[in-house]
Amino acid sequence: MDDHPAEAFVWVWLPGATEPVVVGRLVDRGSVITFTYGRSYLGRPNAIPLYLPELPFRRGELTPHSGEIAGCVADAGPDAWGRRVIEYQRIGEAAELGTLAYLLASGSNRASALDFQESAVDYNPRGHDLVPLDELAETVDRIESGIPLSPALERALHHGSSMGGARPKAVLADGVQQKIAKFTSATDSYPVVKAEYVAMELAHRAGLSVAGVSLDRVLGKDVLLVDRFDRTLDGGRKLVVSALTILGLHDADGMAGRYATYSDLAFQIRSRFTDPGATLKELFARIAFNIMVGNTDDHARNHAAFWDGTQLSLTPAYDICPQNRVGEEAAQAMAFGDNGDRLSQVARCIAHSDIYHLTAEQAREIVDHQIDIIHDEWASVCDLAELTKADRDRLWGRQFLNPFALYDY
Ligand SMILES: Nc1ncnc2c1ncn2[C@@H]1O[C@H](COP(=O)(O)OP(=O)(O)OP(=O)(O)O)[C@@H](O)[C@H]1O
Ligand SMILES: [Mg+2]
């Protein structure tokens, strides 16, 4: 395949549809990639804009206002892990690939409801054969240690290349439920997969809306299985945009959107989301929970919303992953205060509760409940994860309920 394709066609699964239709064309104009809606798509009675205000429904070439490519398109493309897989597959070829090459090389079972094709007429999915979990786990090992793959394993790679994120992962189906498998990485210095499981399960028990998770062991290593929320059980797909896109920001604005804040996201929720009151409360609860389980990797690609053509609604929470921590002091990736406050302390978060339309008392109730659940359910969730005593002792008081998080509370 071409390293710098001049164009790629975007296909979409419209709400309720189980087959994709062609939407329009991406064209590489050097420093930017433009998008043009196709006439056939604009003429469809059930067509929706891919995302607003970014890609308004009109004829002609749309140039991104900022960044290289429309954010909703970037959200459906591969991230650090997926790019690594694609580069691995193309060893010996030109090292530098154009943005459209990554979109056209990654697997079709990607995040959100878009896919990218060389043709506007024929839809040919890439990487659609199902691969057993143990084969997938083997590919992760091999890629990380640079060992060549068999042709079957090469095909298996397509399953992970299109999902975003930096950690090794793949997509698979468990009956009609599609899942994301997140693998242990050779560079993990603590049981990351189990810690993510424990945090996600505790979040669910604390009443947050969270993607369903389970743990598996493959080739002696832990694998986290996460239920996908961007698929329907009848084979449909749901459009999803990241908070980065909702905030009108891009990766080019700095590491995972340096300027993205929870307070700006709250502003968007008030004006553009379904059920803003309940959504603001849920967002506050997610911020508080991230602080209490040491998930400081809560950047703007780790929050997302469904897009129905008119309105946004928050997706279930995902990637609540306690981070490695040296010492006590920590800061969240996104500021929750309108003054840039991002220090990982629930008391500070409560001081800004009005941004989330909560009184200090309501905010305290949420935090108190979460603290109770973390205390009460810790042992049973750690049992489910089969965490050793040593690992529990390492995580408790460091990632989970670090004294710093509860300072002044
Ligand atoms: N349950 C889910 N359903 C649908 N899409 C999901 C789900 N979980 C994650 N995603 C999508 O896949 C991407 C990667 O997943 P995730 O954030 O869990 O991976 P990661 O490698 O741990 O990320 P990071 O780089 O933030 O560490 C997310 O940004 C999101 O777009
Ligand atoms: Mg992530």
Image (cartoon, rainbow, N blue to C red):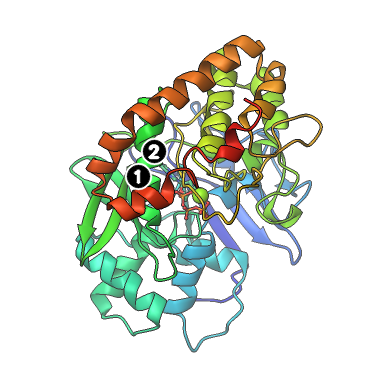
265 lies above or below 220: above
Would you say residue 48 is visible in this rendering?
no
In this rendered view, identify the residue nearer to me: 267 or 213.
Answer: 213
How far is mark 2 from mark 1, CA to CA? Answer: 5 Å
Q: Quadrant of residue 276?
A: top right
Taking the image as shown, residue 337 lies to the left or right of residue 388, namely right
In this rendered view, identify the residue nearer to me: 228 or 140.
Answer: 140
Please report the residue visible at 46 percent of the width from the left and 41 percent of the height from the top.
400
Find residue 406 and name its label. none
> How would you rate the neighbour count of disc 2 (Cα within 10 Å): few for under 14, some for 14-19, many for 20 or more?
many
For this orientation, the residue located farthest to the right is: 339
Q: Quadrant of the C terminus?
A: top right
Residue 67's x, y, as percent?
Answer: 74, 53
In this rendered view, identify the residue nearer to me: 206 or 377.
Answer: 377
Find residue 200 and name its label. 2
Q: Amino acid at mark 2?
A: Met
Residue 205's x, y, as percent?
Answer: 35, 26
Return the residue at label 1: 197
> How would you rate the neighbour count of disc 1 (Cα within 10 Å): few for under 14, some for 14-19, many for 20 or more?
many
Q: Secondary structure at mark 2?
A: helix
Please report the residue visible at 40 percent of the width from the left and 43 percent of the height from the top.
20
Please report the residue visible at 73 percent of the width from the left and 49 percent of the height from the top.
258
Q: Secondary structure at mark 1?
A: helix
Please report the residue visible at 55 percent of the width from the left and 54 percent of the height from the top.
325
Residue 38's x, y, as percent?
Answer: 58, 45
**Looking at the image, do the residues carrying marks 2 and 1 touch, with CB atoms under 8 Å apart?**
yes
Callout count: 2
Residue 207's x, y, as percent?
Answer: 40, 22
222 lies above or below 357: below
Q: Amino acid at mark 1?
A: Tyr
Would you say residue 38 is visible in this rendering?
yes
